[in-house]
Amino acid sequence: SNPYNIAEAVKESDLVIGAVLIPGAKAPKLVTEEMIQSMEPGSVVVDIAIDQGGIFETTDRITTHDNPTYEKHGVVHYAVANMPGAVPRTSTLALTNVTVPYAVQIANKGYKEACLGNSALLKGINTLDGYVTFEAVAEAHGVEYKGAKELLEAETVSC
């Protein structure tokens, strides 16, 4: 999309959900304060990207499950980090259901063979043998990047 289309959509909406994820980077501020001011009083914005800085210029704080909203320019802002924490049992079961198969692969094959044989596991490695293996994170923090596959295939990887 583009700023004009976003502005038009925001102005016409009673609810805007911001859910932009750029792995390893801050979320872009796609909705300006001016766009928020164009919304009808009582409208709601939900900033799911708050863990990465949020996409709304007016999301100036992280809220909690105990105090989940605040109002700015007549618009209700919901900016709870870790939203699944509101339903801990359900979210834990969901997370467990998707992660246990990976843990089983690692247990059966060892981490090196499991990661080299499964692209999802390989992509899940963030640090290895003293290196950051996620390029965007390495760049954001000014540290050296080395690819996980390259490190796993080398004989020098230590446990």
Image: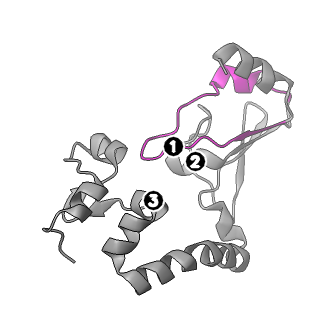
Q: CA distance from mark 3 to mark 1?
A: 28 Å
Residue 6 found in image quarter = top right
Give the quadrant of the C terminus: bottom left
Task: Label 1, secondary structure: give it.
Answer: loop
Q: Which residues are magenta?
A: 15-40
Magenta highlight on residue 22: yes
Q: State the residue in front, 68 or 84.
A: 84
What scheme was used to colour the molecule?
one colour
Q: Which residue was labeled with disc 1?
A: 53
Q: Secondary structure at mark 3?
A: helix
- Residue ID for mark 3: 119
The image position of residue 141, as x and y in percent, is: 27, 45
Magenta segment, prevailing SS (helix, strand or loop): loop
Viewer-proximal residue among 122 and 51: 122
Coordinates of residue 156 in the picture (x, y in percent): 13, 68
Image coords of residue 36 (percent x, y): 72, 27
Q: Which mark is residue 104?
A: none
Kind of residue at disc 2: Ile
Q: Quadrant of residue 65?
A: bottom right
* Callout 1–callout 2 Cβ contact below 8 Å: yes
Q: Within 10 Å of the Cα at label 2, are there few (<14), some (14-19), or many (20+) other Cα atoms?
A: many
Q: Which amino acid type is shown beneath numbered disc 3?
A: Ser
Asked whether the beta carbons under mark 3 and mark 1 sit within 8 Å of each other, the answer is no
